[in-house]
Image (cartoon, rainbow, N blue to C red):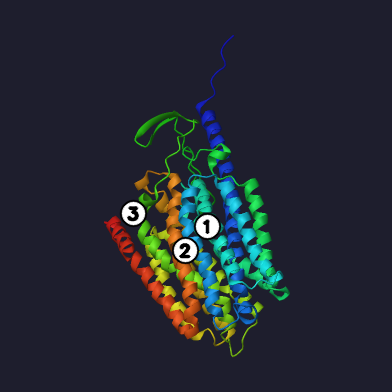
């Protein structure tokens, strides 16, 4: 009996191509699912942070200890309590996220955040007026929420670490911040008339429900689903669909901690060691971007926590808006922020220069803030348009640095692709930014008593300082671009 003839080479090639395409489609579906779930998770974190800014005006009028002569000072201290705890815990959270189960850590942080938000809401129903209680609840909220950011960035970095259009993807994904602010503003303002406690309880339920979804469905790493991105690289192109390239090596050598390992395809890679905290600080670009974010986030979070209060206390076309209307109107700033983050990510991919893009947005945000302060009160149309433009330019570099830049720095050649460094680098950058985020709202609580022109001057000085930290990196990018043409 003659042996069966081998299939033609063309048939083998076609079968291999079909297998590769099928595997790539399955990978894309999982990537999109991870992107959507982490987007919703972090949007929920931001939605639960929004109620304090929505209820500020109510607390300052009829709820001790925030209704007295030092009321705005105490409101600023509440913001400081949350943001300083968040910033301090962020560094430890990034270190923990590099070592813990990301799915469990993220889900637990969401459920704990729901509990702290519900505690603040309960103060209304239990008639609690103790400043210490509010401060303690804000500190607890800051600590548990600090785990959210390094977790979601690490998960997305695990799934999209080899994607060439990282800036665009991260630009779209990082709109979760503004989407969460919008959702939180709408939810908190919609139920404010029933009592400010509901403004905390509704977002608390929202983040608790999503926390359960994360615990049940999130796949934190491709290896958890039996996939190896070291053997599969997916490149997404925007024109005419998606081009997928499957790279398979039958045998490769992997170097970990100066020891060489030889492995067959399909065997398990040894996990790289987690990077040290000081070692991460010394990575090229980490410190300049971290300090730039310090001042960028100071500006962004001042708007996050004080914009509804500012709108409520500054007449538009000669009329003062209600508490509810002020909270809903502030959403326009976040809508601008969504488009600003996407635009910054797309532009940085198109020109291949993160620092130049950030500098451009920071420069344009200065005249945007001046125009909003000077002409925003003329009419509702002026207010909405200038608020949108301000949100667009303020949130652009903030979004870009906390996502695409942090991912770039956490996966750069200097650490030989050590994916376990990503959460630590992200936590350093965002943690440093969060110190600025704590400082901005606190200063606003004190400076606003002298007039809002002083607050806007502080914001413009902060943007100018943020620019200074990126000038050298932007210059190097320009030199590299000029050199590449010759």
Front in this rendered view, residue 33 or 70:
70
* Of the two numbered discs 3 and 1 in the rendering, the one whose residue sits closer to the viewer: 1
Marker disc for residue 384 = none
Residue contact at pointers 3 and 1, CB within 8 angstroms: no
**First in residue order: circle 2 vs circle 1:** 1
Going 35% across and 64% down the picture, which residue do you hit? 470
Say if residue 244 shows up in the picture. yes
Which percent across, then down, holds residue 255?
Answer: 37, 35
Q: Where is residue 336 in the image (x, y as percent from the top left)?
A: 54, 70
Which residue extends farthest top? 1
Q: Mark 2 points at which residue?
A: 434
Could you give the CA–CA distance between mark 2 and mark 1, rounded to whole angstroms?
Answer: 10 Å
Instruction: List the residue tagged with mark 1.
Output: 146
Q: Which of marks 3 and 1 is nearer the N terminus?
A: 1
* Residue receiving disc 3: 284
Assess whether mark 1 and mark 2 are in contact (beta carbons under 8 angstroms): yes
Residue 358 picture quarter: bottom left
Eyeballing the image, is 103 above or below 305?
above
Image quadrant in which you'd find residue 54: bottom right
Is the N terminus in the top left, top right, bottom left or bottom right quadrant?
Answer: top right
Q: Quadrant of residue 259?
A: top left
Residue count near mark 3 (Cα–Cα under 10 Å), binned few <14, some 14–19, many ≥20: few
Question: Which comes before the other along the chain, label 3 or label 2?
Answer: 3
């Amino acid at each position: 009996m003659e042996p069966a003839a081998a299939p033609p080479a063309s048939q083998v090639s076609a079968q291999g191509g079909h297998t590769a395409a099928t595997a790539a489609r399955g990978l894309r579906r999982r990537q999109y699912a991870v992107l959507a779930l982490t987007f919703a998770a972090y949007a929920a974190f931001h939605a639960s942070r929004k109620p304090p800014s929505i209820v500020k005006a109510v607390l300052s009028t009829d709820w001790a200890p925030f209704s007295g002569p030092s009321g705005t000072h105490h409101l600023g201290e509440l913001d400081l309590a949350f943001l300083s705890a968040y910033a301090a815990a962020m560094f430890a959270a990034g270190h923990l996220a590099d070592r813990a189960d990301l799915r469990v850590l993220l889900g637990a942080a969401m459920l704990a955040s729901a509990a702290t938000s519900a505690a603040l809401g309960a103060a209304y129903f239990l008639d609690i007026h103790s400043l210490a209680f509010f401060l303690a609840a804000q500190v607890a909220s800051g600590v548990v929420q600090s785990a959210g950011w390094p977790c979601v960035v690490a998960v997305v970095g695990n799934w999209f670490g080899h994607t060439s259009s990282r800036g665009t993807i991260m630009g779209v994904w990082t709109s979760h911040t503004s989407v969460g602010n919008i959702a939180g503003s709408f939810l908190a303002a919609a139920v404010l008339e029933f009592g400010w406690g509901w403004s905390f309880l509704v977002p608390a339920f929202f983040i608790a429900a999503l926390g359960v979804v994360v615990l049940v469905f999130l796949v934190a790493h491709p290896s958890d689903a039996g996939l190896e991105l070291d053997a599969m690289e997916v490149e997404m192109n925007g024109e005419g669909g998606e081009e997928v390239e499957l790279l398979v090596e039958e045998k490769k050598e992997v170097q970990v901690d100066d020891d060489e390992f030889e492995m067959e395809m399909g065997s398990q890679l040894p996990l790289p060691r987690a990077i040290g905290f000081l070692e991460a600080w010394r990575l090229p670009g980490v410190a300049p971007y971290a300090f730039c974010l310090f001042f960028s986030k100071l500006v962004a979070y001042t708007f996050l926590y004080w914009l509804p209060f500012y709108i409520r206390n500054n007449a538009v076309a000669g009329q003062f808006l209600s508490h509810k209307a002020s909270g809903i109107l502030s959403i326009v700033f976040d809508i601008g922020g969504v488009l600003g983050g996407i635009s910054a990510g797309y532009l940085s991919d198109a020109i291949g220069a993160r620092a130049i893009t950030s500098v451009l947005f920071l420069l344009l945000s200065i005249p945007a803030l001046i125009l909003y302060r000077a002409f925003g009160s003329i009419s509702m149309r002026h207010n909405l348009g200038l608020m949108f433009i301000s949100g667009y330019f303020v949130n652009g570099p903030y979004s870009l640095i906390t996502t695409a830049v942090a991912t770039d720095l956490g996966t750069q050649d200097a650490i030989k692709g050590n994916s376990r460094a990503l959460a630590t680098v992200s936590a350093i950058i965002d943690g440093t930014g969060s110190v600025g985020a704590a400082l901005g709202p606190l200063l606003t609580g004190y400076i606003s008593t002298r007039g809002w022109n002083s607050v806007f001057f502080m914001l413009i000085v902060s943007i100018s300082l943020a620019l200074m930290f990126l000038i050298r990196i932007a210059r190097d990018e320009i030199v590299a671009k000029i050199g590449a043409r010759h």
